[in-house]
Image (cartoon, grey):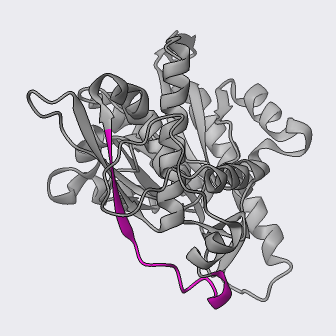
Amino acid sequence: MESKVSEGGLNVTLTIRLLMHGKEVGSIIGKKGETVKKMREESGARINISEGNCPERIVTITGPTDAIFKAFAMIAYKFEEDITNSMSNSTATSKPPVTLRLVVPASQCGSLIGKGGSKIKEIRESTGAQVQVAGDMLPNSTERAVTISGTPDAIIQCVKQICVVMLESPPKGATIPYRPKPASTPVIFAGGQAYTIQGQYAIPHPDQLTKLHQLAMQQTPFTPLGQTTPAFPGEKLPLHSSEEAQNLMGQSSGLDASPPASTHELTIPNDLIGCIIGRQGTKINEIRQMSGAQIKIASATEGSSERQITITGTPANISLAQYLINARLTSEVTGMGAL
């Protein structure tokens, strides 16, 4: 990280991460990226927005502290403008506060809260902003969300104080950053189409997942329950008909009638388990996310050359999880030239 010299002498370079919903990100980017371009130019901060078709995105702001505060001010005022515009079309009389969510390493949250909550109380009282630190870490990370709400001026003062705390108490140990996941779970499969549940509605899911599901239904390595036959690439296994798949999903009786969860077990050779788990668990998390199934990998037992994998979920979730695991194994074995 480079540090820049500003009027006040040496100015520290910092990185702050924000968690935003797609709509908020759209507001920050603006038409043809004009808003974010203006923010970058006027603040002097680097503003990066995470890729991906996710309900949530990470906005990373890096630069000298004064540049970060300018960028934050611009974001806070932009959000206030959005609130004002949305109120002109509604009957609401009280103006909701501007809300920003910071993503902070959990190891720094203790300093932010302070002994007996003293620090966070001091920040609330001196800035007039509401500050809340989430009790749980964000999924698959060692970071927590810190929600700040209030007027734009209160938020800017609050961010300044949080930055001071973060500079005084650097994170301890390695931080696993939070990466928003593409699909909002749970995923339901019905009639060869994938749906995600958002509130009370089932939203058709992107084509990629639907195609995967259709593939899984054609090539399902779905052995009868309780049978622990190793499912290896190339093994001929029973197929599901689309009618059977629809029955499995309880489509005719609405979304509430999801089939009961069942459990299926697989055994995988030790030397192939790595390709399923992936680096820092990325692949297995991907498979969990895409299939909607729970997947547990047993610890290695001494003297055994195999590992047990337990998959729990609806029959369709299990089918998809097995299909994805097999696809990983196939690519690994093919890549090794063993076929």
Q: Residue furthest left?
A: 302
The residue range painted magenta reads 251-267
Residue at (37%, 69%) from the top-left corner?
262
Q: Position of residue 235 (x, y in %)?
A: 50, 39
Q: Position of residue 237 (x, y in %)?
A: 52, 50
Which of the 4 quarters of the picture holds residue 48?
Answer: top right
Q: Is residue 35 above or below residue 20?
A: above
Q: Is residue 29 magenta?
A: no
Q: In front here: 176 or 187?
A: 187
Residue at (31%, 51%) from the top-left corner?
228
Residue at (23%, 46%) from the top-left corner?
110
Which of the 4 quarters of the picture holds residue 60?
Answer: top right
**Residue 320 appears in the rendering:** yes
Left or right of 309? Residue 158 is right
Q: Is residue 327 above or below residue 335?
A: below
Q: Position of residue 283 (x, y in %)?
A: 46, 35
Q: Is residue 174 above or below residue 225?
A: above
**Residue 292 appears in the rendering:** no
Q: Position of residue 54 (x, y in %)?
A: 65, 49
Q: In front here: 70 or 20?
A: 20
* Number of residue marks: 0
Left or right of 8? Residue 132 is left
Residue at (30%, 55%) from the top-left corner?
120
Q: Is residue 298 above or below residue 129?
A: above
